Image (spheres, rainbow, N blue to C red):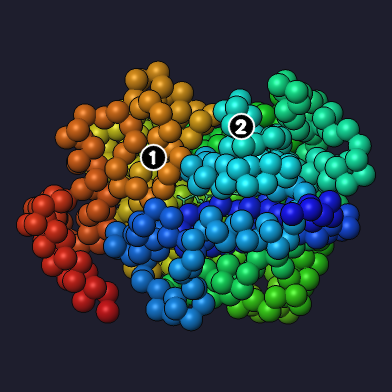
Amino acid sequence: MTPNKKNVLLIYPTLFKVTGLPIGISSLSAVLKKGGYRVKVFDTAFYDLRHQEDGDKIRADRLMSKRIANEEKHWQVKTTDIKSDLIKTINEFEPKIVGISILEPNYGISLMLTRLVKQHFKDIIVVAGGVFPTLSPEIVIKESSIDIVCLGEGETALLELCNRVSSGVDYRNIAGLRVKSGGKIMKNKPGILHDINALPHPDFSAFNEGFFYKPMQGRLYKMVNVETSRGCPYSCSYCSGPKLKKFFLNNNCGKYYRNMNMGKIIEQIYYQIQKHSPEFIYFSSETFLAMTKKDFNTFIEEYRKIKIPFWFQTRFETLKDEYIKALKEVGMFWLTLGVEHGNEAFRKKILKRTCTNKDIIDGISILKKHNFGASLNNIMGFPHENRELIFETIKLNKQLYQINKKLEFNIFMLVPYRGSEIYSVCKENGLLPDGDYSYSGTLDDESVLNFPKEYKQELKGLIKTFNLYVKLPEKYYPQIKIAERSDKEGDAMFKRLSRLLEEDSS
Ligand code: B12
Ligand code: SF4
């Protein structure tokens, strides 16, 4: 193969059937195309790599969301071998540069792919970027199949790399990159945080059609993501966001949290509609409603003409009665909110979330008033937590369910990502296991922490039965306790109670 210096392959390693167009890689693609490069994306969404159950099935089994009814129509699980497919793609496309976007849970899959690339195409330059390489560059740069690590936002650095490689110029000193050279690692000065109003709109055209489909209320819909902000103003202990914020500040790059101009957001919506004709729009922002009143009003007036149903995630602190009323009028369909824990003091001290239970209850009441449901995210398996505290999370969610029957309740096991504040808490408390605990699925029901065996088992049972505890009356608690067990009797009871719940909600 003779690599074509104008061709760039971007690899997007994602978990099985976890679709949803990523803004990061799509923004890189847009910038590269504008710079005259051809871009192809290789994604892993439809390869059953670990022969595990897919994310949506796990969510349905945990009674978190409905099973998908029209999956076969839009999603084709690959029957071919991922390794042969990647080699074939490279042989046909002949890229000189292969970029890979890595989150910590995808690092295992990522290594399998970068090693394959290096083994078969040693002249290709392999560049890794994304949250994990940014926060743990010392781990990633050690990997022999990766030549360059991009720290922070990659639009300018990657384009510069491509330009220098294609014109045969020394590329070892590009800002934002760590580059291996003659046994040494060149640590260059930090890259830049971009003016998000000046970047081209994200380019999704390199993704295949199936990747546009995401489940919503038990059906797949064609969705496009519209970026409205980057970063987040909050500092939750279990999230990598605060560490990213510090990374950019410490490197004098400025503020990670940036809102896009409303004019540019509207332009982006029309652009993506015209290009992809979506059935749904997802506003990609950590906290969509954290915008000024003026921007909100402009959004409402413009979106009135657009009419495509949309959803987003936001914080309880940003929910207001008049906002929800206006959003309903213009097509809001759904939203995701983080409750995360039911004990206010624990939530504040350990999760570093200051919102009160009253804020949460008031927010859900507003949604009820306007006849809206929402997905509520919850986490369990924290250090210093116990069964009693977990039951406070159940209790609060139960209270919310009493107010609003349209709610869906998500429950996840804590995974302490490197660099998050909770990672340090786990470390100090001797809870971190040795090895690569976080480089695999995040929907696991088994805690990765060094808790006693019995407590891990208890957590597993509580993850399984969380929705039963939340939705069934308290008189069923003794039976739900049996359903927590992962033996024959426990599973049979779980099935019986799940059926009861289904009948109750139909
Ligand atoms: C939107 C979002 C999603 C979307 C899209 C995912 C995606 N990869 O973009 C969806 C809903 C699919 C998703 C799912 C998940 N997510 Co998510 N998600 C986010 C969120 C809120 C914003 C991401 C974003 O759009 N950022 C804006 C873009 C512009 O930035 P970016 O993606 O970092 O990309 C820039 C740079 O990193 C760099 N870059 C990125 N890739 C590359 C590649 C190359 C070659 C180069 C040079 C540069 C480069 O340049 C890009 C452009 O500037 C972040 C929070 C955050 N602040 O990062 C969490 C976050 C990334 N998610 C996270 C997690 C854990 C998950 C899930 C595992 C959750 C789950 N339980 O299922 C899944 C895994 C999905 C998967 N791919 O396998 C974690 C990752 C933690 C970590 N340390 O790695 C984050 C940081 C949130 C957190 N809890 O801390 N997520
Ligand atoms: S609000 Fe969400 S994105 Fe922001 S720090 Fe908390 S968990 Fe992270």
Q: Which residue appears farthest toward the front when viewing the image?
A: 1
Judge from the rendering whether residue 444 lies leftward or rightward of residue 279; answer left or right: left
How would you rate the neighbour count of disc 2 (Cα within 10 Å): few for under 14, some for 14-19, many for 20 or more? Answer: few
Looking at the image, residue 436 lies above or below residue 333: above
Amino acid carrying label 1: it is Leu
- The spot of residue 8 in percent (x, y) is 76, 53
Q: Is residue 1 above or below residue 242?
A: below
- The residue that appears at 58% across and 37% down in the rendered structure is 132
The numbered mark at residue 309 is none
- Give the camera-side residue of 346 and 279: 279
- The crowding category of the residue bearing disc 1, from other C-alpha atoms within 10 Å (few below 14, some 14 to 19, many at least 20), is many
Which residue sits at x=34%, y=20%?
430
Q: Quadrant of the N terminus?
A: bottom right
Mark 1 lies on residue: 414
Q: Are marks 2 and 1 in contact (CB under 8 Å)?
A: no
User: Does any portion of residue 274 appear in the rendered image?
Assistant: yes
The residue beneath circle 2 is 144
Percent across and percent down for residue 139 are 57, 28
Label 2: which secondary element: loop
Q: Tell me if residue 145 comes above or below residue 224 in the rendering.
A: above
Amino acid type, residue under disc 2 in the picture: Ser
In the figure, 213 relative to 58: above or below?
Answer: below
Q: CA distance from mark 2 to mark 1?
A: 30 Å
